[in-house]
Image (cartoon, grey):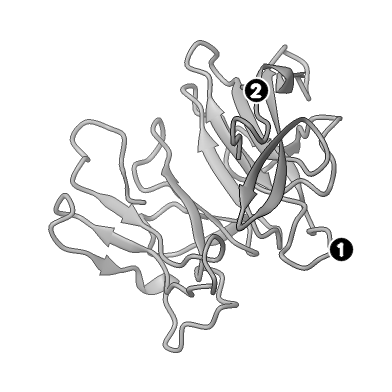
C-alpha cells in the first residue's frame, strides 16, 4: 500500500511497493518501488529498484512495508522485502543499501514516535524445514546498527510478525505473530476440513537497559475456536 512522508509540507511525496509473494495461488513478481511527487496523480518507478526481466529473485520483487522516517531527513526511506531483508535509502530512493539482511519470507519495519526503528523477520523462508538466516525482532536508533531484542519465548518457526508502536510509550511496541503450536489457537472449517492457526501477542516496554522487557499477552487475545471461527 502507498505511504507518504509524515511531515507537514511534504505530503505530495508518496512511495508504493509491488509484488505479492504470499496469499494467492501463485507468486506475483513485482518490479521495484514506485514514487509520486504530485500527491499520487502520477507515478514513476525508481530506477534503482527495477530490472528489465523482473526476476522473482530480485531484491525489490516483493515488498511488505515501506516507511519514511518522520523525524530525520525526509529522504530517509526503508523498505521491508521478502527474502532480502530491509533496505535503506537516504536520497529519496535514488540509491539503496541493505541495512539488515535476511532470507525470511516475511519481514516488517516500523518507526516509533521517538524515532526508534524496529524490524522483524520470520523464521519461515517458504521452504519446509528451513530456518531463515535472521529471524526475530531487531531494534535500531540510527537505521544502521541493529540489536536483537527477540522475546525469549519466541521460537524459530515463527511465521509472519506484525509490529505496531505504542503511542503512550516513546519506543514501545506490540508484536503480533503467527506462532505454530504456541499461543492462542484459532480454528475454522475450510472446504470441509478443520484448519488451525496459533497466534501470540507481546508488548515491549524499554526499561533503560537493553534488551528491555517483553510481556507475553497471548492470553488476552479474543477467544478463538472452531465455533467462533477465529482464523
Q: Residue at x 34, y 68 (%)?
A: 46
Q: Is residue 25 left or right of residue 75?
A: right
Question: Circle 1 — which element?
Answer: loop
Instruction: Examine the image and state in which quarter residue 102 appears.
Output: bottom right
Extreme residue toward the bottom, this view = 53
Extreme residue toward the front, this view = 192
Q: Earlier in the sequence, mark 2 or mark 1?
A: 1
Q: Give the residue at mark 1.
A: 129
Image mark for residue 156:
none
Q: Determine whether label 2 and label 1 are within 8 Å by CB.
A: no
Q: Nearer the viewer, residue 164 or 149?
A: 164
Mark 2 burial class by Cα count in 10 Å: few <14, some 14-19, many 20+: few
Residue 69: image location, x then y, percent: 43, 38
Q: Residue at x 44, y 52 (%)?
A: 90
Q: Is residue 80 left or right of residue 91?
A: right
Question: Circle 2 — which element?
Answer: loop
Residue 129: image location, x then y, percent: 86, 63
Image mark for residue 223:
2
Amino acid at each position: 500500500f502507498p505511504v507518504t512522508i509524515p511531515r507537514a509540507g511534504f505530503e505530495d511525496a508518496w512511495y508504493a511497493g509491488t509484488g505479492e509473494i504470499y496469499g494467492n495461488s501463485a507468486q506475483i513478481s513485482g518490479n521495484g518501488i514506485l514514487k509520486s511527487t504530485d500527491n499520487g496523480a502520477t507515478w514513476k518507478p525508481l530506477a534503482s529498484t527495477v530490472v528489465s526481466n523482473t526476476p522473482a529473485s530480485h531484491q525489490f520483487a516483493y515488498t511488505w512495508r515501506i516507511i519514511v522516517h518522520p523525524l530525520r531527513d525526509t529522504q530517509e526511506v526503508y523498505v521491508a522485502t521478502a527474502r532480502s531483508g530491509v533496505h535503506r535509502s537516504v536520497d529519496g530512493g535514488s540509491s539503496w543499501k541493505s541495512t539488515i539482511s535476511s532470507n525470511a519470507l516475511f519481514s516488517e519495519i516500523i518507526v516509533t514516535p521517538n524515532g526508534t526503528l524496529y524490524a522483524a523477520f520470520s523464521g519461515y523462508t517458504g521452504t519446509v524445514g528451513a530456518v531463515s538466516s535472521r529471524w526475530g525482532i531487531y531494534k535500531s536508533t540510527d537505521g544502521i546498527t541493529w540489536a536483537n531484542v527477540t522475546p525469549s519465548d519466541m521460537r524459530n518457526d515463527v511465521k509472519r510478525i506484525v509490529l505496531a508502536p505504542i503511542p503512550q510509550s516513546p519506543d514501545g511496541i506490540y508484536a503480533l505473530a503467527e506462532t505454530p503450536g504456541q499461543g492462542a489457537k484459532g480454528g475454522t472449517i475450510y472446504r470441509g476440513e478443520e484448519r488451525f492457526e496459533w497466534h501470540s501477542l507481546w508488548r515491549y516496554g524499554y526499561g533503560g537497559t537493553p534488551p528491555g522487557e517483553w510481556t507475553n499477552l497471548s492470553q488476552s487475545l479474543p477467544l478463538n475456536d472452531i465455533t467462533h471461527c477465529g482464523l
